[in-house]
Image (cartoon, helix red, strand yellow):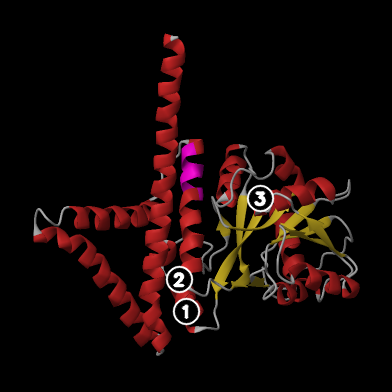
Amino acid sequence: MPAGSAQHTASRDVLVVLPTLNEEGYIEACLRSLLGGAADRYTAVVCDGGSSDRTREIVGDLSTEFPQLSLLKNPKKLQSAAVNLAVSQVTSPDTKYIIRCDAHSIYPENFLDDIVSSLETTGAASVVTAMDSVGTTCFEKANAWAVDSLLGSGGAAHRGGSKSGYVDHGHHAGFDLGWFRKVGGYDESFSHNEDAEYDHRLSLAGGSIYLDADTRIEYTPRGDIQSLARQYFNYGKGRARTILKHAVRPKIRQLVPVAAVLGILFGVALLPLSPWFALLPVSYLVVAVTVSLTFALSKMSLCGLWTGFALATMHLSWGSGFLSQVLKHYSGRSERSVSNNIQKQR
């Protein structure tokens, strides 16, 4: 669907929700891209998890320019809780759709209209969008190139994808409010991967998820290795929780970073037995270096040399987070089993 192909005319049947926490560097540009051309048609709420920077002050200043914009305190801090809170406190009997937005993103003209049009045209329970990662600093650019590559995303349809159609998961954008309530909204015990967990329950309930690849957003990835590592460690933990909660089989692309972590660990641990085990970590290092050189040459930029580091950070952090959650789950279950046996013996 081309941008701006349909104009949504209803005034207050759509709620736009932005979860935030310390987003002073991004929130104004994000809100202006969303509301600049839709000031009279959408109700928007920023659900802030207790920012210690100027995020709330900036939103307060913008609310004088955009009177339909309000600020809501999110005591639970999590994005999942923010959207649920907005649904419970800000929606009205007339609200039909909700649109979840990300403060780290810049939205194209008519984005809100196009999401609503997709929901109305397809009748889908959820409309997801394609993400194009972009950066300004050298590491952000390398991070963006890495995450949108096959090695970085594993071929996920919403990561730079160009084909619209029904999918099992994507970057969350628009929701039919009736379906959202029917499946119970987000699981607030999830700090990460709440979107994939929601999509799984939605699919089980019979709801469809439509990827509108013509409606795209630009996403600014993390700008340093430390924050990228934290982000992907939490992503891995969240994905493991979803898999364990619903007893589903992980996809091959999700097993690749786990295999990378295990391969490196086993290679280092078994090295005293034979120098051949060094091939495991060394092979991964060669792949990372090759990725860096390939992107540096293909992009004609020295920033590409960071790409292998970014990719390795994503893989190893995601895999470590996944494994830590699996170990926590089964060790906790083992402890509960021992405790139950002791109780029975008493």
Q: Does residue 336 lie above or below 288 as drawn? A: above
Q: Tell me whether the residue at label 2 lies in contact with that at label 1, contact meaning CB atoms closer than 8 angstroms.
A: yes
Task: Report if residue 39 lies within the magenta region.
Answer: no
Tell me the number on the disc at residue 139: 1
- Mark 3 crowdedness (10 Å alpha carbons): few <14, some 14-19, many ≥20: many
Residue at 65 percent of width and 56 percent of height: 127
Q: Looking at this view, is 340 or 20 the one in front?
A: 340
From the top left corner, tell me how far across and down residue 73 is, in percent: 78, 55
239 falls in the magenta region: yes
Q: Amino acid at mark 1?
A: Phe
| Rendered location of residue 149, percent (x, y) | 42, 70
Q: Closer to the N terminus: mark 3 or mark 1?
A: 3
Query: Mark 2 highlights which residue?
Result: 225
Question: Pointer 2: residues within 10 angstroms few (<14), some, or many (20+)?
Answer: some
Amino acid at the residue labelled 2: Ile
Left or right of 163, for residue 128: right
Specify the quadrant of the image occupied by residue 19: bottom right
Return the residue at label 3.
80
Q: Amino acid at mark 3?
A: Ser
Element type where label 2 sits in the image:
helix
Q: Main secondary structure of the magenta part?
A: helix
Label 3 secondary element: helix
Observer able to see residue 4: no
